[in-house]
Amino acid sequence: MTGFKEKLESLYLSYKHKFSSKDPVWILHRFEDEKDIELIGLITAAYAYGSVEQINLFIEKLLSKTGNKPYEFTINFEKRKDKKHLKDLNYRFNTSGDLVNMFDSLNRNIKEFSSLKNLFLSNYNKGEENIIRALANFTGKLNMNGKQRGGSYYHYLFSNPNRGSTCKRMNLFLRWMVRKDEIDLGVWGEVDTSKLIMPVDVHIARISKSLGLVKRKSIDLKFAVELTNRLKEYDSSDPVKYDFALCHIGMDKKEF
């Protein structure tokens, strides 16, 4: 175990200082205000499917439409008035209508809770094993205020762990908000890093299996929990810190 942990730590440290202009997380580093960071963080994570280039291009277009002021745009959002600004912002199978409904939901929730952090903390309990229940309530609230129409994929943007999926993009968002280092922004310090769940997609699942970290075959929420618990053997207080490095192993064609 010691040798494997040393390799993991070395891998983490090798990427900890690596500024990758391609990774969407760097977009968040442009902002200083916590309310801007959490909003653009959630939106970026929600749309973090497809190629990195596609994701970044979409977020850049969105920021341009909002005047690079995500919080100001959101808190002042009015569906009838502002939907014209977003009419051309379609992304893969999510339409501009989904984006309009997203901002409408974000506007309502921020007015009710003052911030996304407060919304999350309203159901967060430090005594629980992990953030799964809090995340379920968080995305449930965001989906509740999103009006779903026939053929809409709005609810795909805010995946809910109650459905058994890995919730990769929402767990990625929480990693960005809760952890604090050169990569993650750590603006939600009230949440314990030990409660986070690894963001798992097909790529991370493949790497995890090849390293013998997970035995489960199905790539679902139980897979993500099993991987997280295994990584706690190497860092019980911050198991998700290895995510960025593990994710980039295959991308950079590095061997572990």
Image: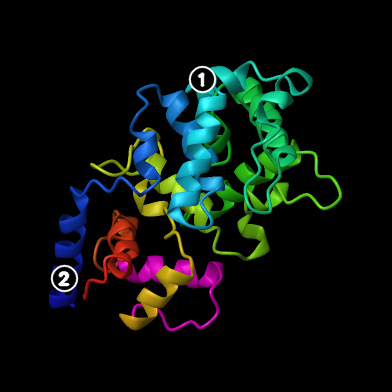
Q: Position of residue 143 (x, y in %)?
A: 71, 43
Residue under label 2: 7
Residue at (19, 63) in percent of width and height = 11
Side (left or right) of 222 relative to 164: left
Quadrant of the rendered structure where residue 227 is?
bottom left
Amino acid at pointer 1: Gly
| Depth order, front residue of 54/146 | 54
> At 66% across and 43% down in the image, what residue appears?
90
Quarter of the view holding residue 108? top right
Q: Is residue 184 above or below residue 249?
A: above
The reply to whether residue 131 is visible in this rendering is no
Applied colour scheme: rainbow
- In the picture, the disc for residue 67 is 1
Distance from Cα at disc 1 to Cα at disc 2? 43 Å
**Residue 193: horizontal and vertical position, in percent?**
35, 48
Q: Secondary structure at mark 1?
A: loop
Q: Secondary structure at mark 2?
A: helix
Q: Along the horizontal axis of the image, is 74 left or right of 41?
A: right
The span picked out in magenta is 213-232
Residue 252: give x, y in percent of width and height.
Answer: 27, 65
Quarter the C terminus occupies: bottom left
Give amino acid for label 2: Lys
Q: Residue 118 location, x and y as percent?
A: 53, 29
In the image, what residue occupies the spot 55% across and 67% down? 221
